[in-house]
Image (cartoon, rainbow, N blue to C red):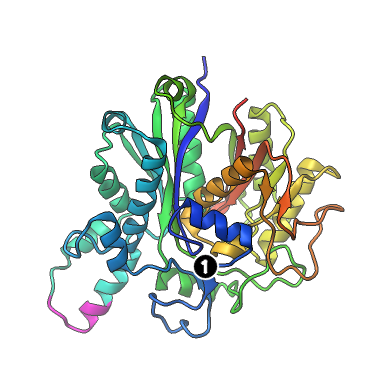
Amino acid sequence: MSQKVVVTGFGIISALGTNVDENFNSLKAGDSGVKKSKYLKSEYSNTKVCGEVNLSNEQLRKEIGYTANDINCRTTLLGLHAVSEAVNSSNLENSHLKGAMFMNGTSVGGMVLTEQYFKEYKEGKPGDYKDIFKSHDCGYSTEIIANKFNICGGTVTISTACSSSANTIMQGARYINAGRTDVVIAGGTDALSKFTINGFNSLKILDDNPCKPFDINRKGLNLGEAAAYLVLESEDHARSRGANIIGEVIGYGNANDAHHQTASSPEGNGAKLAMSKALKMAENIDIDYINAHGTGTENNDSSESAAIEGIFGENVPNFSTTKAYTGHTLGAAGAVEAVISLLSIKNDLIFPCLRIEEPLLIGSSKPIVELTSHVVNTVLSNSLGFGGNCTTLIFNKLR
């Protein structure tokens, strides 16, 4: 018999704040964390804005009890910070962690260190560069985080661009559904890097100013950095230890949109199929709110709009996107928006799109543009990655 999958803890660090409460308060106030970067220095530092976490690497290390000699990778430091909050909020004991699985999503991985090593190497600085072969690997942060928390039940790293951490949540839920484990810590982490800023700039999809997704005159996305994780448990395990249950994962779906490596099909075929799979699993439950992928690019917003209309017709649920608050956090985005979806459920609030002047309609429906009090029992969250990797998650108040 399939096990119910519940969420018993969550943690997040983003441009909006260093924990769940700070992120919630920023969302509620309509504050955006998108601005010029303070810590990442590149040729675009003075011309591009981004969602940067307002802590230096030294401050991040200090908060989680590391020294400079222990670890320098910002992607890993962000992940350690968010996992710590998730574990603490779930009240998991060491014995539970030892048998848990850790599933980590990332797009950038240790690229931030690779850039640093490359610069020093070109300048002829002496150094031991063998560590680059470890830190460059996407699984580098996964290994360090699992070791830090003594998570011994297995580790998985998923790198599917912008859907990476949504896929870790889906895979974690699948493992629990199948009875293969009772506890999974799932999410993702990504730091800002020159590699991603230069790459997205070459695609000409960055907005120099704070972005405005789902506006007809949108000009592109803003990049961001973040880490976010959920503690997933079987309901039986959670209840046996008296855990506080935040919500339930009742549906998930993944599909490929084979249109283009860096663009979705105009009809949103991949997103449409991912949503239909998730809704079928959730027994076509009524959706109260859609947290859209909504990056602010011309292609994404129009393609995702077509997909949502293709699924819901003229009965499109309330929808918005929160990337104008955090920036597009790439591999961490799915988990960031999973936390935001659960905050919507927990507080019966829908966080609005920002900066919309002329809304892009889905059918005849407009995006939510003001903080809205509304009964939110069920949220559908989309994460659409490069390479056509499309994932949909559905969260619900425990039934």
- Residue at which label 1 appears: 223
Residue at 55 percent of width and 46 percent of height = 338
State whether residue 261 appears in this view. Answer: no
Q: Quadrant of residue 108?
A: bottom left
Residue at 13%, 68% in the rendered image: 128
Magenta part of the chain: 119-126
Residue 272's quadrant in the figure? top right
397 over 212 or under it: above or below:
above
| Looking at the image, residue 141 lies above or below residue 124 | above
Residue 396 image-quadrant placement:
top right
Q: Is residue 348 left or right of residue 362?
A: left
Indicate yes or no whether the magenta region holds residue 120.
Answer: yes
Q: Position of residue 321 (x, y in %)?
A: 65, 56
Q: In terms of secondary structure, where does tag 1 sit?
A: loop
Instruction: Report the amino acid beneath label 1.
Output: Leu
Q: Is residue 217 magenta?
A: no
Front residue of this view, candidates 397 and 260 = 397
* Picture quarter with the C terminus: top right
- Measuring from the top left, give residue 164's x and y in whole percent: 47, 49
Q: Which residue: 22% across, 78% down? A: 120
Note whether 75 is above or below 163 in the view shown: below
Q: Which is more toward the observer, 347 or 387? A: 347
Q: How many marks?
A: 1
Choose between 301 and 121: the one closer to the eye.
301
Residue 363 x %, y %: 84, 52
Q: Position of residue 148 (x, y in %)?
A: 24, 46
- Residue 237 visible in the picture: yes
